[in-house]
Image (cartoon, rainbow, N blue to C red):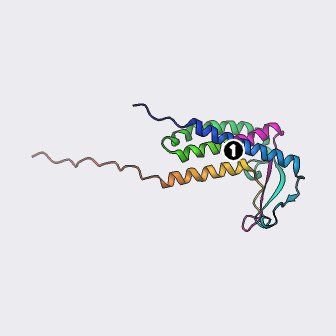
Amino acid sequence: MRQRRPDFLLILSVAAIVFAADQLTKSWVRNSLTLGVPWDPVPWLTPILSFTHVTNRGAAFGMLPQLASVFPLITVAVCALMFYLYLPLTKGRPLATLSLGLQLGGTLGNLADRLMRQGWVTDFLDLNFWPLQDWPVFNIADSSVVVSVCVLAVVLLLEKEPAQIQSPEPLQPPE
């Protein structure tokens, strides 16, 4: 009997949606918001979230900006490794498949920025509430990657315990 392959259409569809949303929002931010100036279009949302256009040369949350030139290579390697290690987990797990699509779309969204913007990534989601008011500004791609990891963690944590290996019958001495 042929084993069911991962649903590549779902992975690619989710990745395409995340990628498009990420690139469209980043384009809007670059064309509409002044660098470093928060924009609060909805007054009741201001204590929770502002839109602040910033650029980021670092990895997640601005870490290691001095390695910006190698991040595209690292990203490609991580994508390949992610598919190699992660793809088997999607078999029979639609949420894990969704998670892989989120991960791929977010990773490619930030990679596109790095390649088109000389190593910079556009960020704009700025949390204002305690305890996250000092959290680094982020974007849709970053959010997608974090959500994908959370979804995968939940899938794996809620999975039924694997079947217990039966101990062999104890040997009986010969009569």
Q: Is residue 175 left or right of residue 77?
A: left
Tell me if residue 23 comes above or below residue 51 in the rendering: above
For the point 43% across and 31% down, the residue is 2
How far across and how far down the image is residue 174, in percent?
Answer: 12, 45
- The amino acid marked with disc number 1 is Val
For the point 40% across and 49% down, the residue is 162
For the point 56% across and 43% down, the residue is 97
Tell me if residue 117 comes above or below residue 170 in the rendering: above
How far across and how far down the image is residue 153, in percent?
Answer: 55, 53
Screen quadrant of the N terminus? top left
**Bounds of the magenta span?**
106-133
Q: Nearer the viewer, residue 172 or 154?
A: 154
Q: Is residue 44 left or right of residue 147?
A: right
Q: Which residue is mark 1?
A: 18
Disc 1, SS: helix
- Mark 1, residues whose alpha carbon is within 10 Å: few (<14), some, or many (≥20)? many
For the point 61% across and 50% down, the residue is 149
Q: Nearer the viewer, residue 23 or 149?
A: 23
How far across and how far down the image is residue 8, in percent?
Answer: 57, 35
Q: Is residue 127 left or right of residue 86?
A: right
Tell me if residue 33 comes above or below residue 115 in the rendering: below
Q: Nearer the viewer, residue 109 or 59?
A: 109
Q: Is residue 88 left or right of residue 35?
A: left
Residue 116 in which image quadrant: top right
How far across and how far down the image is residue 62, in percent?
Answer: 77, 51
Tell me if residue 157 comes above or below residue 74 in the rendering: below
Residue 60 belongs to magenta span: no
Let me know if residue 57 appears in the view. no
Q: Residue furthest left?
A: 175
Let me know if residue 78 appears in the view. yes
Residue 130 belongs to magenta span: yes
